Each structure stands twice: as C-alpha cells, then as structure tokens.
Amino acid sequence: MPRLAGWLSLALFVIAVDQATKAWVTAVFRLGEGVAVTSFFNLVFVYNPGAAFSFLAAGGGWQRWFFVVLALLISGWLLAMLRRHAGERLLPLALSLILGGALGNVIDRLRFGAVVDFLDFHAAGWHWPAFNVADSAITLGVALMLWHQFTHKESGHERASASR
C-alpha cells in the first residue's frame, strides 16, 4: 500500500499544480485576454466547454456532464489499475499523470462548466489549441502508457497463461 500512496500523491500533486496555475490565470487575465511571452508562445485565458481540440464545444451544455461522468469512470479504472500495478514504475507513473490531469479538468467543469485553458503555442500564424497543465499531464501519461505497451516484454496473453 505504501507504493500506491506515492502514486496517489503524484496524482494529487498534478491536481494541485494544475489548479494553482489556473487560479493564477483567472486572477491575472480577463476572459479572452492574453500576453505574448515569446515569438511562439502566449499565455491566454479561455474556457473550453468541450474536450481536446474543442471537440463537442458547441454541444449546448450536455457535454459538461458527459465529460464529468466519463472522466470519473475513467478515474475509477485508473485507480484500479494503479492498485494492481503499484509496485511497478513506468505504468503507474503514466496512470498517476492521467488520473491527476483528468481530475484537474473535472474540477474545472464542476466549478466553471468548462475547462480553463491558457497555454497557447503557435508558428507561422497557426495556433495549437490552447491547453493547460492537466492536459499536459494526460498527454505525457498517455505517451508513457504507450511506451510501456511497446517496451513491455510479456504480452497480455502470456501473462494470462502464466497465471493459470
């Protein structure tokens, strides 16, 4: 159980950093306001009622609860997977990052009805959709999960056969 506590602490750390950065952005900027930090990066304050790339942003409001329920269901699955793999390194790291990011965005949806986004990267007049720390943690976690899948030596079938 001590290893599980460490992974859950990482998820809580992601939530805390995510919420602290969003609190700073909402305190410093007005909605829609931004500032150029470099020639390719801005800080902006926007709400995204949808998912990644503003998917379902124009849904009329139902998507808020859909994404809250979906994220909570996925978080439950992530917790179960964390318990099962707490003694490992790479997979629980990935799961903890995804869990913290998912719950960070759930907090926004419950508080604001949308997710606070503020990181705006751009090049040659093209802007990547704005995102936040939670989104970054989810993306890194998914990348690590994929890395784990590609580098893990045993297949799922071999593990199932070995446990019989």
Image (tube, rainbow, N blue to C red):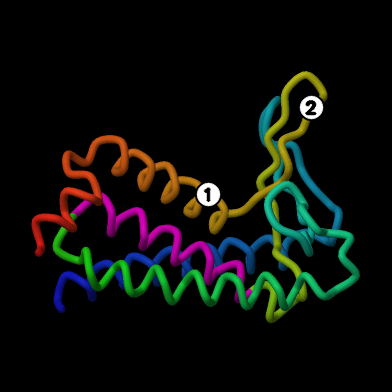
Quarter of image, res 106? bottom right
Which residue is label 1 attached to?
136
Mark 2 packing: few (<14 Cα in 10 Å), some, or many (20+)?
Answer: few
Quarter of image, res 6? bottom left
Q: Secondary structure at mark 1?
A: helix
Which residue is label 2 attached to?
126
Say which of 17 and 73 sits in front. 73
Sequence order check, earlier mark of 2 and 1: 2
Residue at left 69%, top 52%? 118
With 149 as the anchor, is 62 left or right in this view? right
Say which of 5 and 65 sits in front. 65
Say which of 4 and 59 sits in front. 59
Magenta stretch: residue 103 in it?
Answer: yes
Amino acid carrying mark 1 in the image: Ser
Residue at left 73%, top 47%? 53
Residue at left 20%, top 66%? 86
Instruction: Measure the alpha-carbon separation of dots 2 and 1.
Output: 20 Å
Residue 97 place in picture, x, y as percent: 41, 58
Amino acid carrying mark 2 in the image: Trp
Main SS, magenta residues:
helix
